Amino acid sequence: MKLVILDRDGVINEDSDDYIKSVDEFIPYPDSLDAIVRLNQAGYLVAVATNQSGIGRGYYDEKTLTAMHEKLAQQLDQRGGHIDYIAWCPHRPDQDCDCRKPRPGLLQQIGRHFDIRLNDAIMVGDKRADIEAARAVGARPVLVRTGKGERTLAQPSALEGVPVYANLSTFVDHFLNQDA
């Protein structure tokens, strides 16, 4: 099985330092939606691993998160695409859970869901935590400049050997051409 794991905020949709707290604030990048469709068409499973500490902070609830993901599913469906699985962590950083990236719990959950090893998977993110989580499970990390990607680039020690792309669409273009 071929698997690409995506961070959500900043990779699939616009991000905000004030959190994405409502369905109206959840605005997918159109080129990211198209990139996901291309991954689907190429036979890749597409999963999402996303920290959602806004739930633990009381900014929004699980019902709102579900509505955001339903919006994503509808927009992908209109383009002929889909997400195969979404793993999310509701905890605040101070709750010391195993699922919050950079810890590997979300990615391990995805691996268990598909019953696959993650050493052939790719993790696309915009933060250092995404890169560290990918490395913790042996997946290949990729960084995009969207979302908090430019800030992450200011921390070059975390990026050794990590390919960097302008956005998810640019990564998918390169990746699928390489895979062909």
Image (cartoon, rainbow, N blue to C red):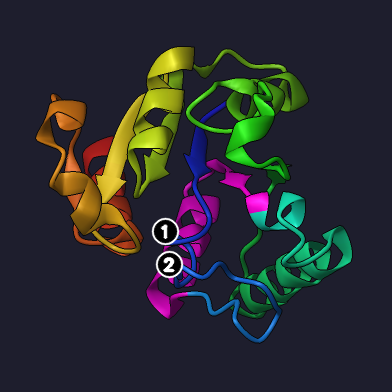
Which dot, 1 or 2, sits closer to the camera?
1
Specify the farthest residue to the bottom: 24
Is 130 a magenta residue? no
Numbered tag placed on residue 104 in the rendering: none
Percent across and percent down for residue 1 are 58, 26
- Residue in the image at 16% along x and 39% along y: 155
- Residue in the image at 73% along x and 19% along y: 112
Percent across and percent down for residue 44 are 53, 41
Residue type beneath disc 2: Ser
Contact between marks 1 and 2 (CB within 8 A): the answer is: yes
Any part of residue 83 in sight? no
Q: In this view, does 85 lie above or below 24?
A: above
Residue type beneath disc 1: Val
Where disc 1 sits, the SS reads loop
- Earlier in the chain: of badge 1 and badge 2, it is 1
Percent across and percent down for residue 40 are 55, 53
Q: Is residue 81 above or below residue 39?
A: below
Percent across and percent down for residue 90 are 73, 45
The residue range painted magenta reads 29-53
In the rendered image, the quadrant that contains the C terminus is top left
Nearest the viewer among 180 and 164 is 164
Residue underneath mark 2: 32
- Mark 2 surroundings: few (<14), some (14-19) or many (≥20) residues within 10 A: some
Q: In terms of image quadrants, where is residue 64?
A: bottom right
- Mark 1 surroundings: few (<14), some (14-19) or many (≥20) residues within 10 A: many
